Image (spheres, rainbow, N blue to C red):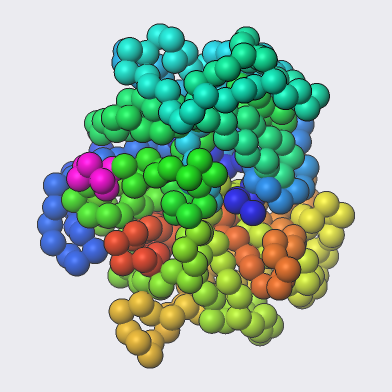
């Protein structure tokens, strides 16, 4: 279980953001700090005729939308790539120039030979296995210096050699960052507008067993505070590293504690949809998931009170577009991290959890709530793009908590 996506939500940096009004920047304690490193995010329509699940849990093939993606650099001289900034996984990898799999076609490819700062990582590995995969290493059946990382996703997989190289994230330089050089990708990656994954999850989740890039930022003292925050809007967004941008929210930030050492996971002390109480749940806050993922039973409960809602048979639901204005919000009750006996509520309106129709003549809209079983207990949800676009979301590693405040609207992204 790593992360789940209904069209892969790619959070990626891009240099297109123009100058914006001066921001007020603070640490979580309220002290004024220098501006954070700000990564602008763009949205791009997926060219595929189906959506893509990018983790270890099979997902629906219903295509609705798009994802966020952005730019990093690797090597000296720098090679630029578009990557998913993903809070639901903890490994970093990009596609290798040695990859011949169909899934590698149409992507920028990393050449370790072109980087003078590249270093091998690991041990000699006898790559003489052939499992029938579309493996493309030029030096198969030879002793190769390095360590292999294999990751299986919901509808695909990758195989990557681990190495170390210089990674650039905005103005930050991470030297000797361990990363995967993917030499095998399944065809599921074809047409996706990104070249790799930039895991922002916790270290315990890393398949490489090596520190993810955010941990490297902390180790090299590149951030004023051990935090990053995400601002997502329908047509773009930003990631703030090291400080908070108070122009991106108006209400006070409210924090709740993490409940897991692998995922950015929190406890929902109660959830209710209008007058329908759903109960306590666990939730992973995942920037790599487009929809909110709830249990199949919870999806039936929620959509069961919406007149005209239809189960699409692929874990997704459709809702009559004309009903949006009359639908109740989904309300989440969370324990207040700064008040031992306090709670606070987050209210997600129908305009956030019902997605715009694909065509202007459509009468049914895709619900932003999908029903899928993610764990044996059947109580885990994922709060993905549908949820995060409504809130400025702070990932506070130092205090092991996540903060939320209703996001302001920016016409350039909205």
| Most foreground residue, 205 or 401 | 205
Residue at x-position 39% and y-position 44%: 211
**Where residue 410 sits: x, y (%)?**
38, 46
Q: Residue at x 18, y 50 (%)?
A: 224
Could you say where residue 110 lies in the image, as x and y percent from the top left? Answer: 48, 17
In screen coordinates, is 92 left or right of 8?
left
Is 125 above or below relative to 150?
above
Identify which residue is drawn at 40% across, 9% down. Answer: 114
Asked whether residue 314 is drawn in magenta, I would say no
On screen, residue 277 versus residue 335, left or right, reads right
Numbered circles on residues, count: 0
Give the farthest residue toward the right: 313
Q: Find the magenta span and give its range.
A: 217-222
Q: Can residue 15 be seen in this view?
A: no
Is residue 26 visible from the viewing direction of this image? yes
- 130 over 353 or under it: above or below: above
| Rendered residue at 57%/25% (across/down) | 125
In the depicted structure, whether residue 309 falls above or below residue 304: above
Where's residue 37, x and y in %?
26, 40
Q: Position of residue 39 (x, y in %)?
A: 34, 38
Task: Examine the image and state in which quarter residue 48 appears.
Answer: top right
Q: Quadrant of the N terminus?
A: bottom right
Q: Tell me: 411 left or right of 105.
A: left
């Amino acid at each position: 279980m790593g992360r789940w996506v209904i069209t892969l939500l790619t959070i990626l940096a891009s240099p297109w953001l123009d100058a914006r009004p001066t921001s007020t920047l603070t640490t979580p304690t309220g002290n004024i700090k220098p501006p954070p490193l700000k990564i602008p995010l763009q949205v791009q329509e997926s060219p595929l005729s189906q959506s893509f699940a990018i983790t270890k849990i099979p997902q629906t093939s219903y295509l609705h939308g798009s994802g966020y993606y952005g730019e990093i650099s690797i090597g000296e001289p720098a090679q630029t790539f578009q990557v998913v900034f993903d809070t639901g996984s903890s490994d970093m990898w990009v596609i290798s120039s040695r990859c011949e799999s169909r899934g590698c076609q149409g992507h920028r490819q990393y050449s370790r030979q072109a980087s003078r700062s590249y270093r091998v990582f690991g041990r000699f590995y006898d790559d003489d296995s052939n499992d029938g995969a579309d493996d493309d290493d030029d030096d198969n059946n030879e002793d190769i210096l390095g360590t292999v990382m294999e990751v299986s996703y919901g509808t695909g997989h990758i195989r990557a050699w681990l190495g170390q190289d210089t990674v650039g994230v905005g103005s930050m330089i991470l030297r000797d960052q361990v990363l995967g050089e993917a030499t095998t990708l399944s065809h599921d990656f074809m047409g996706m507008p990104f070249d790799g994954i930039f895991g922002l999850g916790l270290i315990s989740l890393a398949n490489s067993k090596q520190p993810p890039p955010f941990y490297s930022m902390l180790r090299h003292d590149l951030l004023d505070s051990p935090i990053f925050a995400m601002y997502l809007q329908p047509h773009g967004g930003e990631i703030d590293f090291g400080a908070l941008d108070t122009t991106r929210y108006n209400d006070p930030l409210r924090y709740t504690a993490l409940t897991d050492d692998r995922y950015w996971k929190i406890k929902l002390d109660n959830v209710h949809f209008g007058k329908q109480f759903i109960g306590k749940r666990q939730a992973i806050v995942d920037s790599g998931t487009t929809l909110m993922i709830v249990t199949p039973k919870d999806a039936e409960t929620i959509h069961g009170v919406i007149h005209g809602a239809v189960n699409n048979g692929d874990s997704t639901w459709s809702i009559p577009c004309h009903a949006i204005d009359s639908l109740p919000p989904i309300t989440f009750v969370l324990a207040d991290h700064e008040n031992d006996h306090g709670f606070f509520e987050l209210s997600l309106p129908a305009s956030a959890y019902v997605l715009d129709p694909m065509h202007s003549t459509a009468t049914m809209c895709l619900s932003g709530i999908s029903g899928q079983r993610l764990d044996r207990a059947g109580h885990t949800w994922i709060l993905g793009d549908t949820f995060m676009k409504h809130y400025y979301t702070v990932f506070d590693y130092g205090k092991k908590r996540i903060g939320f405040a209703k996001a302001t609207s920016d016409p350039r992204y909205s």
